[in-house]
Amino acid sequence: MKKIIYFFLFCLPLLCFSQEKNDIFLSEANGNPTYYRISRPNSDCPVLLRVDEKTKWISFSNHESGDTLKNNVFLGEAKTIHLEMRIHKDSLRYYRYSVIKNDSVYLVDDAIPRKINFKWPKGSDFPEYFTMSLGDYNVVGKKIVVKIYKLPQKFKVNTIVIYNQPLLLPKVLTKSLFLESINTKGLSVSEITKMMIKRGRESFFLKRQPLNDGETITISDSIKLMSIGIENTGVNFIYKVKITRYGSDYPEETVLTTSDWDNSYISVDAEYFKKPGNYMVTIAPELRSLDIPRGASLTLPLTSFNFIVIDKRAKLFTAKELFLISIIIGGFVGLISVLILNNRKKRAATQLAQKSQEKEIAKLQLESVRSQLNPHFLFNALAGIQNLMNKNEVDNANRYLTKFARLTRNVLDHKDLISLTAEKMLLDDYLQMEQLRFGFQYNISASPDLDVENIEIPAMLLQPFLENAVKYGVAEKGSNGQIEINFIKVDADLILSITDNGTGFDTAKNYDGLGLALSKNRISLLNSIYKETLFMLDIQSGGNGTTVKITLTQWL
Amino acid sequence: MRTILVDDEAANLENLKILLAKYCPEIKVVVCSTTIEEAFAQVKLHHPDLLFLDIQMGKTTGFDLLKQLTEKTFEVVFVTAYDHYGIQAVKFAALDYLLKPVDPEELKAAVEKAKIRIKNKIDGDQLNFLLSQIKKSEATIPKIALPQQHEIRYVSVDDIVRCVADNTYTFFFLSNGDKILISKPLKEYADLLKPQGFVRAHQSHLVNPKFVKSWLKEDGGTLLMTNGDKIPVSKPNREMVKEVLGK
């Protein structure tokens, strides 16, 4: 009996330990793990973060001014995190990393990443790369700092700070106005010196005057700035001060947003609150790249106070005079502005009409050059299905027939945009049908950090290039033919690429048969519609094959 | 499951029958009809569990059959070749449909879904809802059926503030503050609601312009909603969003 009890006592810590290990990490609906890239884009140490299912929210890129290699990550109620890093296998030994808990305890001190999570195979997005584990960490109520560098650049340290602590309510300790006590304009140096002796040195510094919540300020030139001091939150840089004016001339106007803290103080130049009106100052954290994976609501702590600004100069006239003057000036200004506005409106309207007309034309042109399914493919595909029927392969005939129907429907539907998931399916349908004829191999992959369900691209963008890859690339190679399609995210760019191992062609020459001119035309039309996001086409062709790369810049 | 097939082309009926026998053996096809009149009589006689119903049948539609039947104690899977208007209405009612030629995989999924609905006795009001939507003129504001696990909410399109994608799920934010999670991707609802004036401001956000308060310049473009929510506008959509809101 005793033995059994001992055995249980022995097992208990083990059980606890394994439970700790069993934290389920966050994954997408399709089962792929959710990763957040938490190193800065210009870093050569790409660090990925996974958080557990307990995590309510994550804000994964908060930069401070000054350090271009530092990033701050904020987590809501995470329990465990997992860190990893993608490194080329030959440079593993050059990397060193440290993990520090609460600025005091080194959990890892200048170690080489040793645990391999995943070896990227040949033909994948990152051949010859290893995904190295930097470990799992309990982060309950903690601040974790990760420091990484690559030898020999020992000084180029990438710092990632992960905060898993509640965001503090910004507590305003002081708020005050600073006034100039003497107008020194137009005075000579000797005059100023005389005054200094007379009044004392103090008077030449700005005079501080406390500001109360709801106070009315009569604005004058002597008011120079407002200063707000808060209790240090440790992460002041994410706290934004916003000043909003509610005036009679303009219903709501944000006059300033700033997070330019000097220690725990922020100064606001009086220029920002010169106009009369009610002002509201709010201070609240602003989280960048916020993800709320489980749809939990997130309320950020917010502090606010008000003040009212009135203009003393307005009192120079009596109310009656003011009324008269304003009517005269108002009428005059009104008349002129009506004339100007009318003119401008007309011009804007014609400009807008012209613009939308241009766009309409571009859209129509796009429609006409939208690649249609090649008739050659169409009838050959039908013949392929006929062949299956005659061989009594009914299941296969059904399969290919529905694929064929899906492809045709997509061409007939004339949709502008299509999700990456749907595009992947159509390319897959097309390739399966062509595979029936030519027997090549293919692979379609999307990098895991792409939200393939919701990111959309122009429909039928890749189809013509894929047809070329089949027809001129791998058709002759039989089962040795290989086509690789990749959807990759690089910062805000989306890169779509098709690679085949055919015999290639000279990109400088014009091949009418390749339909390249049509595709190039189509891309330039897309550029005239999506003006802010450039589409770039890059074709590399040689004896070993062809790669077509379409980059949708700033698309994500 | 006792099932009736309705389609004006005999070849299609035969084909569907073969596919059902092969892939869904639990389906017992009681009878097939090629006209609405015949189908009406057969449904009254046999009280089927499930109906496969063609939408476009010569000059009549499958909807006409449903209009004539006052008691709808069966599930319906619509079948159509290429019919934008009909499918749109069916989607608004969150009912199931198949496209011809019928994909065996989709057929299996549709039967599976019908089975669950029959088992859980999910209220059959969706068919009446569908008919009421078809009857209405184009000028009235349509309603949309939002199927949740245990109930179906019928929501006026005008009461939807915005939708947010969460992978293959969609969150609906309603004007009364309710938040509903639906297990369909945002893309489907974008297709349904764009013709109603909704704007896809971002890959994860679909917005009802009625609830947009103003355009903020922060972060290169943000929509401030009347309830204070801020919606990012992604770069490729910026011009389009401005255009729609400018109108």
Image (spheres, coloured by chain):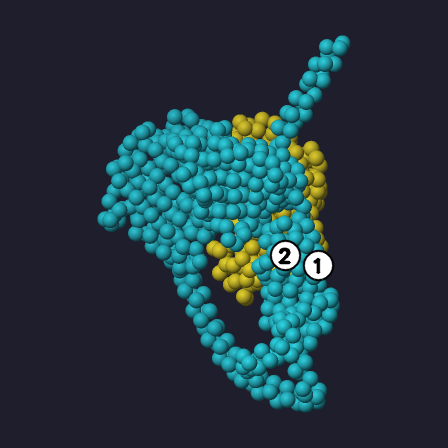
Chain colours: A cyan, B yellow
Q: Secondary structure at mark 2?
A: loop
* Amino acid type at mark 1: Leu
Instruction: Specify the subunit that label 2 lies on.
Output: A
Numbered circle sitting on residue A94: none
**Measured from the top left, where is residue A267 in percent x and y?**
61, 64
Numbered circle sitting on residue A264: 2
Q: Residue at x 66, y 53 (%)?
A: A232
Q: CA distance from mark 2 to mark 1?
A: 10 Å
Q: Secondary structure at mark 1?
A: strand
Q: Nearer the viewer, residue A454 or A54?
A: A54
Q: Which of marks 1 and 2 precedes in the sequence?
A: 1
Instruction: Specify the subunit that label 1 lies on.
Output: A
Query: Disc 2 vs disc 1: Cβ atoms closer than 8 Å?
Result: yes
**Above or below for B236 versus A401:** below
Residue B103 visible in the picture: no
**Above or below for B139 versus A27:** below
Disc 2 crowd, CA 10 A, few/some/many (<14, 14-19, 20+) = some
Q: Which residue is mark 1?
A: A173
